[in-house]
Amino acid sequence: MLAASSAWAQQISHFEATQVRYSDDPLPGQASFRYRLGTRPVLISAPHGARHWREDHWKMQDGYTAALAHVLAEHTGAHALYTVRRIRPDPNYDDDCDYKRTLAKLLRDHSIRLVLDLHGARFDRAFGVALGTIEGHSCPDFEAGIIQAFVAQGFELDAPDFLDRLALNMPDYRGGVRQRTVTRFVWEQCRINAIQIELNAHLRVVSNHAPTSFTFSPDPVRQRRAVEAMVSIIAAVAVGQ
Ligand SMILES: [Zn+2]
């Protein structure tokens, strides 16, 4: 079982505030990313935890995904890999990068069976959670169970409130049909199941210590439901070990 909801949110908020620097280069001799070893055959990836260089400019971070990956791993025993400083090139766009080389080694060394690649969508996108499996290709063994885990937490395809909407392979959120994403890399080059999970900002931004130009209110109840879904996904994979 998870700690109380507020304790969970405090851990995520504290980690993001103290460990993640969106716009800073890594310290000399260090990478822009960190990993946390686990005991279960699932790896949580957050390549956009800080700003990332794509083509010719720095793109904004997917706020709180690094903290979410770390805290989820801490509670479940999953492995985690996430960026804590700005990173170049964007690991979700370019295959020739240390993030993916480290990821491939972790997958091999720890017999990982499933990668959850966490991302963030803007607060006004028309879904709470968007799952991308490259049109049903990248996660054949776990896709149905993952959908079921979100449905069990009240997310559904035709929910009247957009924040309860669960989208599957919607345009722009398909997990790597056009781009060399982490999901595509894991599936095509490592032959391991992978899924991209995009969380609306309402479901991932815990507190406002890093204000953006947008105004919205974090939704702790839905955040908790999304976290519970991911905890049950990780637990289900461990059982089948
Ligand atoms: Zn992203």
Image (tube, rainbow, N blue to C red):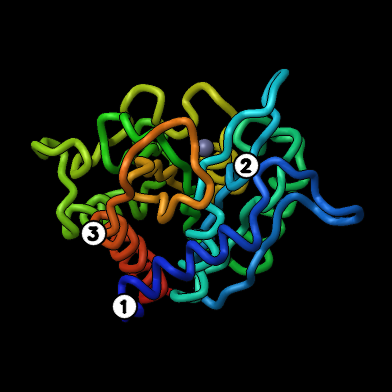
Q: Which residue is mark 1?
A: 4
Alpha carbon separation for disc pair 3 and 1:
12 Å
Q: Quadrant of the C terminus?
A: bottom left
Estimate the x, y position of residue 80 in percent, counting from the top left. Answer: 58, 62
Q: Residue at x 65, y 44 (%)?
A: 22
- Residue 128 vs 31, above or below: the answer is above
151 with respect to 195 (left or right) = left
Amino acid, disc 2: Gln
Answer with the quarter of the image where residue 146 lies: bottom left
Question: Which numbered disc, 3 or 2, marks the residue that appears first in the sequence?
Answer: 2
Tag nearer the camera, 3 or 2? 3
Kind of element beneath mark 1: loop
Instruction: Find residue 191 and report its horizontal and vertical position in percent.
Output: 55, 48
Position of residue 73 in the picture relative to residue 160 (left or right) = right
Q: Which residue is mark 2?
A: 189
Name the residue carrying label 3.
221
Measuring from the top left, give residue 208's x and y in whole percent. 45, 50
